[in-house]
Image: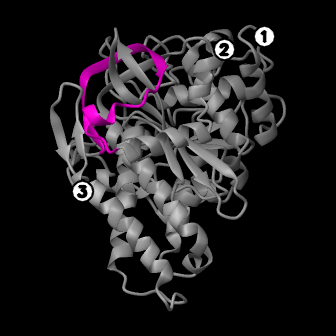
């Protein structure tokens, strides 16, 4: 890959002077949180009502629908200059979706086309709700200043972390990009009580799972390295946290990741394939989503406490995708991957986060004033929502997850989502611009577009 092949290099005319400084493209008034929310709700209300927005093409000024070429895809943060300009116009990022690209495309479809799926995210959001998108191409720009980027992107309507062609199992596959695998892990931080919904797609789903495990390991290391903490004179709090962390370390360091054919691909959380491993079959094309079923712990060597903890999480929280399977008839979604998130890793992460959260509750005020205060941002739980099959065989056990954050004081629950599938791609697996732009009516009938819209809609309510 040539790093000269950046949005700025491809489109030198795409300067900030051409940016729209009022949110929205299709509607007569400015687009904002309320209008976007109402329009998404109308999109989801049924499968047949007409488009409430003007029936104008999104390709009139940008005929090839390329990032950085022209409106409505002019907002590409390819350098510090664009980032500085965006910071001067908060209305733009507060009324938009931030799209994070870890790689320049998500793979090649059966036609041999490189699929830049971020284009479809932007198209669907604009077409159904006149919601702008801002692209952060990390593969070409690098991380920029995380202390600035993270608060900025999480202040918008949503953050979408797209897929990508490299494998998270091999850091060298990210060579040639301006952001390494380690850099991308640094970007995926915990969600605060006031931040936007995050949706992690395909490679993003796998990166998020590695981040779950890394955060748990970091928490365990820091707690077990401490002998004392201020304002904990009898070490009661530290002892409670140490007991939990010792148990998490014991299970994490011994848990095996076993494929359905009995092949053990990883032993313990230090193995590079503990979180993500190779899929039994490469999945390309439409797959029907099925409810996740708990594994047989005895047969698969998974501690029963991990399975029980997940069943409690599934009963306690609503994960949107699992509910959608109930009332959206069958849901068929585009798959486009050869790696998969390991079921055991998510069961472990959910169990560990629940233990940590419960252990912190009695001591949260002391923790808040200590060096361990960052632990308060960790998820409360992670739920596996659905699986996919080929025939009768389950191929991807963990096709989607719900990351659950429960505020210690308000008890308010916020959710982010990860999915191995691509809800933004239609069944042809083509990016808008390579294929004819789908109509509002076609999107309204498409399972993936509806699921993408529903996740945005639910997340905006939190």
First to last magenta residue range: 275-303
Is label 1 in contact with label 3 (beta carbons under 8 Å)? no
- Measuring from the top left, give residue 310's x and y in whole percent: 47, 41
Q: Position of residue 361 (x, y in %)?
A: 59, 67
Residue 110 drawn above or below residue 96: above
| Quarter of the image where the N terminus is located | top left
Mark before the other along the chain sequence, 2 or 3: 3
* Mark 1 nearby-residue class (10 Å; few <14, some 14–19, many ≥20): few
Mark 3, residue position: 253
Number of other residues with Cα within 10 Å of mark 2, as a class: few under 14, some 14 to 19, many 20 or more: many
Marks 2 and 1: CB-CB under 8 Å? Answer: yes
In this figure, which residue is indicated by the disc labeled 1?
Answer: 49
| Pointer 2 residue | 444
Q: Closest to the observer: 182 or 217?
A: 217
Q: Give the quadrant of residue 97.
A: top right
Closest to the observer: 35 or 45?
45
Q: Reading the chain from its start, which is encountered first: label 1 or label 3? A: 1
Q: Residue at x 67, y 14 (%)?
A: 440
- Relative to 458, 298 lies left or right: left
Q: Earlier in the sequence, mark 2 or mark 1?
A: 1
Q: Is residue 276 inside the magenta stretch?
A: yes
Please tell me which residue lies in front, 37 or 313. Answer: 313
Instruction: Check if mark 2's residue and mark 3's residue have beta carbons within 8 Å.
Output: no
- The front one of 227 and 270 is 227
Could you tell me which secondary element the residue under label 3 belongs to? helix
């Amino acid at each position: 890959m040539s790093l000269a092949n950046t949005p700025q290099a491809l489109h030198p005319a795409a300067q900030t002077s051409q940016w729209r400084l009022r949110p929205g493209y299709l509607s007569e008034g400015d687009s904002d949180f309320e209008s976007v929310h109402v329009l998404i709700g109308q999109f989801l209300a049924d499968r047949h009502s007409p488009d409430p927005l003007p029936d104008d093409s999104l390709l009139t000024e940008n005929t090839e629908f390329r990032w950085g070429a022209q409106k409505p895809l002019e907002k590409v943060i390819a350098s510090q200059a664009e980032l500085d300009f965006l910071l001067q116009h908060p209305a733009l990022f507060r009324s938009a979706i931030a799209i994070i690209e870890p790689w320049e495309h998500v793979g090649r479809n059966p036609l041999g086309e490189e699929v830049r799926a971020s284009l479809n995210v932007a198209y669907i959001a604009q077409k159904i709700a006149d919601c702008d998108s801002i692209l952060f191409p990390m593969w070409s720009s690098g991380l920029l200043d995380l202390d600035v980027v993270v608060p900025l992107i999480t202040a918008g309507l949503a953050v979408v972390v797209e897929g990508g062609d490299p494998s998270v199992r091999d850091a060298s596959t990210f060579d040639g990009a301006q952001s390494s695998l380690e850099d991308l892990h640094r970007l995926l931080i915990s969600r605060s009580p006031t931040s936007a919904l995050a949706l992690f797609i395909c490679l993003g789903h796998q990166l998020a799972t590695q981040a779950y495990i890394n955060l748990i390991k970091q928490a365990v290391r820091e707690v077990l390295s401490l002998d004392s903490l201020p304002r904990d004179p009898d070490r009661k709090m530290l002892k409670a946290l140490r007991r939990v962390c010792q148990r998490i370390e014991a299970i994490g360091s011994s848990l095996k990741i076993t494929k359905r054919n009995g092949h053990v691909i990883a032993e313990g959380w230090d193995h590079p394939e503990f979180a993500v491993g190779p899929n039994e079959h490469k999945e390309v094309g439409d797959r029907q989503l099925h409810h996740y079923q708990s594994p047989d712990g005895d047969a698969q060597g998974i501690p029963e406490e991990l399975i029980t903890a997940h069943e409690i999480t599934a009963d306690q929280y609503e994960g949107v995708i699992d509910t959608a399977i109930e009332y959206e008839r069958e849901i068929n979604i585009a798959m486009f991957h050869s790696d998969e998130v390991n079921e055991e890793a998510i069961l472990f992460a959910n169990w560990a986060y629940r233990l940590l959260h419960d252990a912190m509750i009695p001591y949260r005020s002391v923790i808040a004033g200590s060096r361990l205060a960052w632990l308060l941002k960790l998820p409360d739980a992670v739920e596996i929502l659905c699986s996919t099959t080929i025939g009768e065989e389950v191929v991807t056990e963990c096709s989607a997850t719900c990351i659950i954050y429960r505020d210690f004081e308000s008890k308010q629950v916020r959710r982010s989502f990860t999915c191995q599938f691509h809800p933004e791609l239609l069944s042809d697996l083509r990016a808008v611009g390579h294929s004819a732009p789908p109509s509002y009516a076609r999107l309204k009938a498409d399972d993936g577009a509806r699921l993408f819209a529903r996740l945005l809609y639910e997340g905006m309510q939190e």
